Image: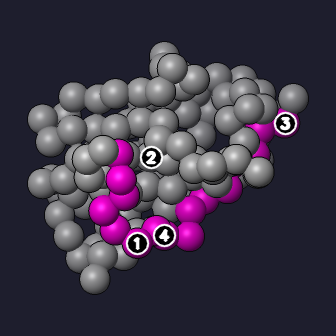
């Protein structure tokens, strides 16, 4: 069974940065398309960043130019560097492997809360 542990969230002011981590156990991230999702209060979960097996990346327009997804296959960990944070980035952030068409492969972890104050 795959286990996902997200960490690194917190309360920051607008314009500041955070780096999220997602430690994966039970499967290798090197053979999976990995992604970061977020869910804001009262909204559905959305995919904000993807990293493909060849390490190419794709971002939602709302985070493009501010967020960077990366992976460390040796540590089996996926990261999300978030810069120039905005109040609208406030959400619980989750990682997962992605199946077509953008479906999560594994059961969700607990997520990590990111709160951005104005």
Q: Give how far apart the Cα atoms at labels 4 and 3 are.
A: 25 Å
Q: Please name the residue that numbered disc 3 is placed on.
A: 117
Residue 81 visible to an observer of this rendering:
no
Tell me which numbered mark, 3 or 2, is placed earlier along the sequence.
2
Q: Give how far apart the Cα atoms at labels 1 and 2 are.
A: 14 Å
Residue that extends furthest to the right in the rendered view of this protein: 118
- Please determine whether, in this image, residue 98 is positioned above or below residue 2: above
Mark 4 residue element: loop
Tag in front: 3 or 2: 2
User: Which residue is painted at 20% across and 70% down in the image?
Assistant: 27
Residue nearest the observer in this picture, 91 or 9: 91
Range drawn in magenta? 102-117
Q: Please name the residue that numbered disc 1 is placed on.
A: 107
Q: Please name the residue that numbered disc 2 is placed on.
A: 36
Q: Give how far apart the Cα atoms at labels 1 and 3 are.
A: 30 Å
- Please determine whether, in this image, residue 108 is positioned above or below residue 97: below
- Tag on residue 109? 4
Tell me which numbered mark, 4 or 3, is placed earlier along the sequence.
4
User: Which residue is painted at 47% across and 27% down in the image?
Assistant: 60
The C terminus appears in which quarter of the rendering?
top right
Mark 3 residue element: strand
Mark 2 residue element: strand
Tell me which numbered mark, 1 or 2, is placed earlier along the sequence.
2
**Residue 7 location in percent, x, y?**
54, 60
- Please determine whether, in this image, residue 116 is positioned above or below residue 97: above
**Residue 45 location in percent, x, y?**
57, 50
Labelled pair 4, 1 in contact (Cβ < 8 Å) = yes
**Residue 103 location in percent, x, y?**
36, 53
Mark 1 residue element: loop
Mark 3, Cα crowd under 10 Å, few <14 / some 14-19 / many 20+, is: some
Mark 4, Cα crowd under 10 Å, few <14 / some 14-19 / many 20+, is: some
């Amino acid at each position: 069974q795959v286990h996902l542990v997200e960490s690194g969230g917190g309360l920051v002011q607008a314009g500041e940065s955070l780096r999220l981590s997602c430690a994966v156990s039970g499967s290798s991230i090197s053979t999976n398309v990995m992604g970061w999702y977020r869910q804001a209060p009262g909204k559905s979960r959305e995919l904000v960043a993807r990293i493909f097996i060849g390490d190419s990346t794709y971002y939602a327009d709302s985070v493009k130019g501010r967020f960077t997804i990366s992976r460390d296959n040796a540590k089996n960990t996926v990261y999300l560097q978030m810069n120039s944070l905005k109040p609208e980035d406030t959400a619980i952030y989750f990682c997962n492997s992605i199946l077509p068409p953008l479906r999560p492969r594994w059961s969700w972890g607990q997520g990590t809360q990111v709160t951005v104050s104005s």
